[in-house]
Image (tube, grey):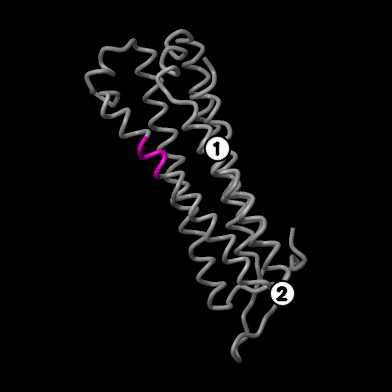
Amino acid sequence: MSHNSETLAHEVHEGGHAHRDDVGSKMGIWLFLFTELLLFGGMFILYASYRYIYPNDFKAAALELDPILGAVNTVILLTSSLTVVLGIVALTKNNAKLCMTYLWITQVCGLAFLVNKYFEWTHKIHLGIYPNGPALDDMAQGERVFFGLYYTMTGLHGLHVIVGMAFIGFVMWFIHKKYITSTNLQKLENSGLYWHLVDIIWIFLFPLFYLIH
């Protein structure tokens, strides 16, 4: 992915001697992403188990969700993943300004995703579909389980979006300060990998909650 992924690189900054281990950094982010996959993988197994127990209730509960809102958020995240990649490519070509432009677009997409999710959640809460809410209490057991998983999994995913935006924000600051350049962009690539994970998890969440009836 990067032309600077040798085992160990050394750089001199402002008269000092800074050590870099690009391979170690890349392995570290992949190990971290693996633990994230285990976390969400366990939740997907839990979802599948309860869906097997309450198939009709899960179908009825899924009809309460708006697939258009879910589709819009899918397009937003796919766009943001594309701009992250374009940002990395721009920096490899020594175009830091263009890289920052693409990363800003990524941040705007992340914010748009969260705003969309906020309005979706608040609408459900307004209808009384929340833990111990009047509408949820009147639903069947399987529907209550469905919305419990819905709030837990989409909420945890939203938290990952916030963390990803913060990660990319730090990287943007480093690029602005020229600590990250075309010869030292492992942190940018790591932030891109994390953002792609966030994107991939949503691609699985979207059909599970919005499309399967």
41 over 90 or under it: above or below: above
Task: Write down the region rendered in magenta.
Answer: 115-119
Query: Quarter-wise, where is residue 38 in the image?
Result: top right
Q: Quadrant of residue 6?
A: bottom right
Mark with earlier residue (1, 2): 2
Residue 20 x %, y %: 65, 73
Q: Badge 2 local density, few (<14 within 10 Å), some, or many (20+)?
A: some
Residue 95 spot, x, y in % from top left: 67, 72
Residue sitting at x 53%, y 32%: 71
Q: Secondary structure at mark 2?
A: strand
Residue position for label 1:
74
Label 1 or label 2, whichever lies nearer to me, is 1
Is 118 covered by the magenta stretch? yes
Q: Are marks 1 and 2 in contact (CB under 8 Å)?
A: no
Residue picked out by circle 2? 9
The N terminus appears in which quarter of the rendering?
bottom right
Measured as percent of width and height from the top left, residue 73 is found at: 50, 38
Main secondary-structure element of the magenta-colored stretch = helix
Residue name at image x 67 percent, y 58 percent: 86
Callout 1 secondary element: helix
Q: Residue furthest top?
A: 56
